[in-house]
């Protein structure tokens, strides 16, 4: 099987994967459309292998890191799904209270990449909580295909309530300094935007390629750090109207466009990952939280 590189792949293949990952294509239709690009030494199996998540070899942290204290906790989401499980991570040694970061997953539940991201933020000196919105259905099932199917069974507004309840749990944790923010990816980016609309005491919000709210933008008081992928036509289409509303209501925000990268560029587990853009965006995110959560 030919070992593929990103530069070998037509951009339309990544666009197809985006449609598949966002439930616009069935797996069967996705495979059928990929066959168009199986030319030369490139086969459909090699394309599938290249595009699908690989968690085993791509995590940047370890749950066994001696510098970390990680544990699964459960909290109650009265307006959402009830009992919600989440990964709570913090530095192993804490001399004082810390700023809190809620880490919100994509449209497939709390997978290893999001847990990894939550641990990364904890290693940077924060207490983090990464909830699993699939908890009412038994939790992340171990693979993203099933995770996406399960998440479609849940009401989006109820899941938003689950993350708002997680924010409250984190903000009131005895080792949190009372200042908490949110970072989210894809679906989690939408959640981050919506939490900024809903929560007047939110200290900071960092949506990665998240769909934008269309109402009550004047209610946003938290500073925003917005990350966009240059090739992400779907999410970027909503940015001009959102930007106009933010400017109209004088909301504090900074927006970054990362050229020539795809939606999901921060996700280390897939071929859309772009190390340079992801590192830059993550360092900006940590600096932003250090400023607003201290």
Image: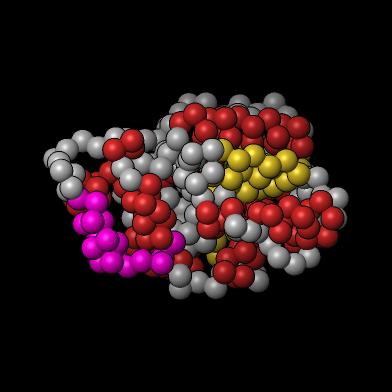
Total numbered circles: 0
Q: Is residue 101 above or below residue 212?
A: above
Residue 128 highlighted magenta (yes or no)? no
Residue 48 is left or right of residue 275, and the answer is left
Quarter of the rendering containing residue 254: top right
For this rendering, which residue is in front, 146 or 32?
A: 32
Whole-percent x and y of residue 266?
A: 49, 40
Most foreground residue, 91 or 3: 3
Residue 283 percent coordinates (x, y)? 60, 29
Name which residue lies at 49% across and 68% down.
Answer: 136
Residue at 61%, 70% (x, y): give it. 157
Point out the image quarter for the C terminus: top right
Q: Main secondary structure of the magenta part?
A: helix
Asked whether residue 32 is drawn in magenta, I would say yes
Specify start and end residues of the magenta stretch as a single range: 22-38
Q: Is residue 140 left or right of residue 167?
A: left
Residue at left offset 33%, top offset 35%: 7
On the question of residue 120 being in view, the answer is: no
The residue at the point 49 percent across, 39 percent down is 260
- Say which of 212 and 72 sits in front: 212
Could you say which quadrant of the image residue 228 lies in? top right
210 up-or-down from 293: above or below:
below
Residue 66 visible here: yes
Where residue 217 sits in the image (x, y, percent)? 78, 60
Residue 268 in percent (x, y) is at 42, 38
Is 20 drawn above or below residue 183 in the view shown? below
Q: Quadrant of the N terminus?
A: top left
């Amino acid at each position: 099987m030919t070992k593929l590189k990103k530069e070998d792949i037509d951009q339309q293949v990544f666009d197809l994967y985006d449609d598949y990952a966002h439930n616009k294509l069935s797996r069967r239709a996705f495979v059928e459309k990929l066959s168009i690009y199986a030319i030369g030494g490139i086969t459909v199996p090699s394309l599938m292998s290249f595009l699908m998540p690989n968690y085993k070899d791509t995590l940047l942290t370890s749950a066994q890191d001696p510098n970390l204290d990680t544990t699964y906790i459960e909290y109650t989401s009265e307006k959402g799904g009830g009992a919600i499980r989440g990964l709570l991570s913090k530095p192993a040694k804490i001399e004082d209270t810390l700023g809190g970061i809620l880490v919100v997953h994509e449209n497939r539940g709390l997978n290893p990449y999001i847990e990894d991201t939550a641990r990364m933020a904890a290693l940077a000196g924060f207490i983090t909580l990464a909830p699993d919105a699939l908890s009412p259905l038994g939790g992340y099932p171990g693979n993203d295909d099933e995770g996406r199917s399960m998440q479609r069974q849940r009401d989006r507004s109820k899941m938003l309530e689950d993350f708002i309840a997680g924010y409250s749990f984190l903000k009131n944790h005895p080792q949190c300094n009372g200042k908490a923010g949110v970072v989210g990816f894809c679906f989690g980016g939408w959640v981050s935007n919506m939490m900024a609309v809903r929560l007047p005491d939110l200290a900071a919000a960092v949506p990665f390629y998240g769909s934008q709210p269309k109402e009550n933008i004047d209610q946003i008081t938290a500073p925003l750090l917005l990350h966009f992928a240059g090739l992400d036509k779907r999410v970027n289409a909503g940015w001009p109207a959102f930007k106009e509303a933010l400017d109209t209501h004088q909301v504090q925000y900074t927006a970054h466009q990362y050229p020539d990268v795809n939606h999901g560029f921060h996700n280390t587990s897939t071929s859309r990952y772009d190390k340079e853009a992801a590192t830059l965006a993550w360092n900006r995110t940590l600096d932003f939280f250090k400023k607003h959560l201290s």
